[in-house]
Image (cartoon, rainbow, N blue to C red):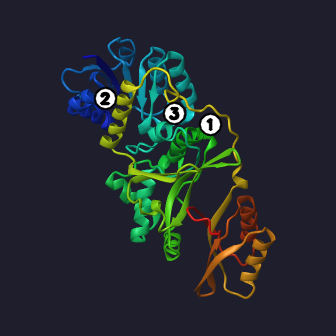
Amino acid sequence: MEVVGIGLVGYGTVGSGVGRLLSEGVDEIRLATGKDVILRTVCELSPERQALVPPGVRLTTDFADLVNDPAIDVVIELIGGIEPARTIQLAALKAGKAVVTANKQLLSQHGAELLQAAEDAGTYLRFEASSVGAVPVIKVLRESLTAARVTGVMGIVNGTTNYILSAMAQTGAEYAPTLKKAQELGYAEADPTEDVSGKDAAAKMAILSSLAFHSRVTLADVEHEGIEAITDVDVTRGAELGLTPKLLGVAKLIDGRVNVRVYPCFIPAEHPLAGVSGAYNAVFLESDSFDKIMLFGPGAGGTPTASAVLGDVISIVNTAPGGYIRNCTCYKQLGFYPSAEVVSRFYMRVQVADEPGVLAAIAGVFGDEGVSIHSMQQIGEEDSAQLVLVLHPVREAAFFSALARIEALPVVRSRPSVIRLEGDDGR
């Protein structure tokens, strides 16, 4: 029986999970592929992780040993970051070896270069585990929906922020202690900046939107906002309005151009994404062809991510030479739709003086800018009041112009809190 040799760079949580699944799933993989898929070599620098490498598997500290070994057909890169991961992948691809990776930051910044290297060498680059862990959204976009015209991708693609916002909604706790609890439980890193700032989600959305719209989107093209400014007060006010907080990646095809962003928002409690809690992820796809599809599952973790990596290996082994889905699917060059022109809905909470004329002043500014109020609540607090407003769909440029004017009003006591609304057009 033909043997497919695997070289693995990085034997941490995911890498050791891949090694375990390859060992435990020998019979199933042989049945699915008609080949023996064998882990031959592991490249790992850490002595602690080296001790985890199974007997009989060659251990090295030089990735060139994998690249130059003719017995290795597929190189799996699981060290993350830009360098040396980029150098390793390029070297492997140029040597004619297929590459599997979970490296979202590298793909979101250098994906075009890597895919072109794979194309030039007549080999494969697979990256299912780079975006939503074990949820097979990349395979669905690349294969199952090849003939569909996807018009929107909206998803919870970061488990850390989803855990934090879910916990705030369930307990009423503030952001800081909830983040600390997430760190204690292992849902958040010691330095959570990449997650809570939205950058991690932005990298994933760059990959997903490139596939969905067949036009290259890089990390630099994705505007992103994090969850650091979300308060327990707004979470509570949102719940009173039947709204649930989420950090969403939102990619839209508008008038033949794409707009891709990451931002915290409220969604209606009855929306399918509202029920995705804890560290789970979900992606909501929209199309004129199939209306809506939601894919749901664990977005991180050693075994789920390792399972996605192994699925890519099996895909490579079973893929015939040539074909549309082999590597890059970005055959279009669509422009980017400016965020200022996107029509959105907004929740706004503002602290104001409790005196006559306040509502008229705020409504007057909104009216001048063409912003329509959908609903409003007033909560009295001694000599001040909180106004909680939900707005009808509006051009973002018009809303933010009105917001700047409202902030400058003498009756406004603090900077307004603003959160977008998704999942309900409010018409």
User: Badge 2: few (under 14), some or many (20 or more) residues near its Cα, within 10 Å?
Assistant: few
Q: Is residue 177 visible?
A: no
In the rendered view of the protein, which quadrant contains the N terminus? Answer: top left
Q: Position of residue 369 (x, y in %)?
A: 79, 68
C-alpha distance separating marks 1 and 3 = 14 Å
Kindly report the distance in space between the C-alpha atoms of the residues bearing marks 2 and 1. 39 Å
Indicate the secondary structure of the residue bearing disc 1: loop
Look at the numbered discs 3 and 2 and tell me whether their residues touch, using CB distance below 8 Å: no
Front position among marks 3 and 2:
3
Dot in front, 1 or 3: 1
The amino acid type, in three-letter code, at marker 3 is Leu
Q: Quadrant of the C terminus?
A: bottom right
Q: From the viewer's perspective, is the residue at label 2 or at label 1 nearer?
A: 1
Mark 1 — residue?
A: 215
Identity of the amino acid at label 2? Ser
**Please, is residue 290 above or below residue 127 in the view?**
below
Q: Amino acid at mark 1?
A: Ser
The residue at which mark 2 appears reads as 46
Q: Give the left or right position of residue 32, taking residue 274 as reference.
A: left
Residue situated in front as seen by the camera: 301 or 374: 374
Q: Residue furthest left?
A: 55
The residue positioned 41% from the left and 38% from the top of the image is 129
The picture quadrant where one finds residue 380 is: bottom right
Q: Earlier in the sequence, mark 1 or mark 3?
A: 3
- Looking at the image, tell me whether mark 3 or mark 2 is earlier in sequence order: 2
Residue hosting label 3: 107
